[in-house]
């Protein structure tokens, strides 16, 4: 583990029995990396120019890294988890909302956290990753090695990709044969839950690796890919929003 455990107050929501049952029900704890999640974190790192991007699941003792890309020390990367007391993601679980930390050394929530030094976390942003029933399972988060003021564009990118990570979990549950009541979104259907998996290739029209290639070729090409009609899925909207905010995309 990273560092010695300090006396900290973890939000009560982290230990909620219903939430913990939902985390276990995903079947993703202690599993290896999967392209469905790694593609999302790679895309987050590219679009946000962030050195680290993660998808985490938070249980009652640790924040498990289902996906982790970037400049992570080898020992931590091999463990793929941090104690819940040190997890920045606990704040997302506790608030059930996005959390933005512009300067981790100054923010009272994180200034004493050992990850500020061991992982060189100087800025952090995380959005909830949720079960289809709405339980916060963990977070989709990015790290910067310098203080950073998170922009509206950053927030929109994170929101879109976190929804897609939640959709990937919904599809995983459905594929594992969980009953519809477990995989159904609030007020929606199993099919609608699957629709959030568009970024993962669940629907054929847009596949995430296509978008990665298009963005590498240039933003104009990415926009042109959707010229055949109004985009109706998350990744198309994300590309167009990047364009509309006049944010240039340059490879490397």
Image (tube, grey):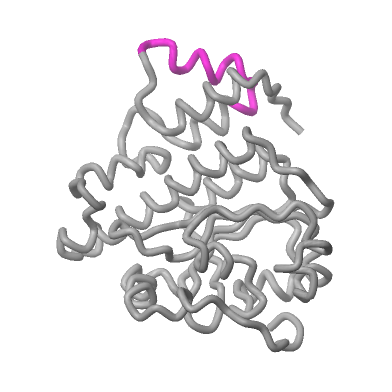
Q: Residue at x 79, y 69 (%)?
A: 111
Percent x, y of residue 37: 49, 53
Percent x, y of residue 174: 23, 57
- 139 or 173: which is nearer to us? 139
Q: How many marks?
A: 0
The reply to whether the magenta stretch includes residue 225 is yes
- 61 or 7: which is nearer to us? 7
Percent x, y of residue 147: 82, 51
Tell me if residue 230 comes above or below residue 13 in the rendering.
above
Q: Residue at x 48, y 40 (%)?
A: 160
- 57 or 80: which is nearer to us? 57
Residue 80: quadrant of the picture: bottom right
Q: Main secondary structure of the magenta part?
A: helix
Determine whether, in the image, residue 179 is placed left or right of residue 211: left
Span of residues in magenta: 215-229
The reply to whether the magenta stretch includes residue 53 is no
Determine whether, in the image, residue 244 is placed left or right of residue 73: left
Q: Residue at x 70, y 22 (%)?
A: 248
Tell me if residue 147 comes above or below residue 22 in the rendering.
above
Tell me if residue 181 comes above or below residue 19 in the rendering.
above
Residue 119: quadrant of the picture: bottom right
Determine whether, in the image, residue 43 is placed left or right of residue 49: left
Q: Residue at x 20, y 65 (%)?
A: 178
Image quadrant where one finds the C terminus: top right
Percent x, y of residue 163: 43, 46
Image quadrant where one finds the N terminus: bottom right
Determine whether, in the image, residue 70 is placed left or right of residue 147: left
């Amino acid at each position: 583990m990273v560092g010695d455990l300090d006396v900290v107050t973890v939000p009560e929501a982290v230990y909620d029995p219903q939430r913990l049952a939902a985390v276990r029900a995903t079947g993703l704890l202690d599993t290896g990396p999967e392209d469905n999640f790694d593609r999302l974190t790679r895309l987050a790192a590219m679009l946000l120019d962030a050195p680290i991007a993660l998808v985490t699941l938070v249980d009652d003792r640790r924040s498990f890294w289902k996906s982790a890309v970037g400049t992570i020390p080898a020992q931590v990367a091999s463990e793929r988890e941090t104690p819940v007391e040190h997890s920045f993601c606990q704040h997302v679980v506790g608030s059930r909302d996005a959390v933005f930390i512009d300067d981790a050394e100054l923010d009272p929530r994180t200034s004493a956290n050992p990850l500020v030094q061991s992982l060189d976390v100087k800025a952090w942003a995380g959005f909830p990753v949720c079960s289809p029933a709405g339980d916060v399972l963990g977070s989709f988060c990015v790290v910067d090695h310098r203080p950073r003021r998170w922009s509206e564009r950053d927030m929109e990118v994170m929101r879109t990709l976190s929804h897609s990570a939640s959709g990937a979990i919904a599809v995983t549950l459905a594929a594992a044969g969980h009953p519809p009541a477990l995989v159904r979104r609030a007020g929606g259907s199993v099919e609608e839950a699957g629709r959030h998996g568009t970024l993962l290739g669940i629907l054929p029209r847009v596949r995430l690796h296509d978008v990665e290639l298009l963005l590498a070729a240039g933003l104009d090409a990415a926009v042109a890919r959707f010229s055949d009609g109004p985009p109706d899925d998350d990744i198309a909207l994300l590309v167009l929003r990047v364009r509309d905010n006049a944010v240039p995309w340059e490879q490397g």
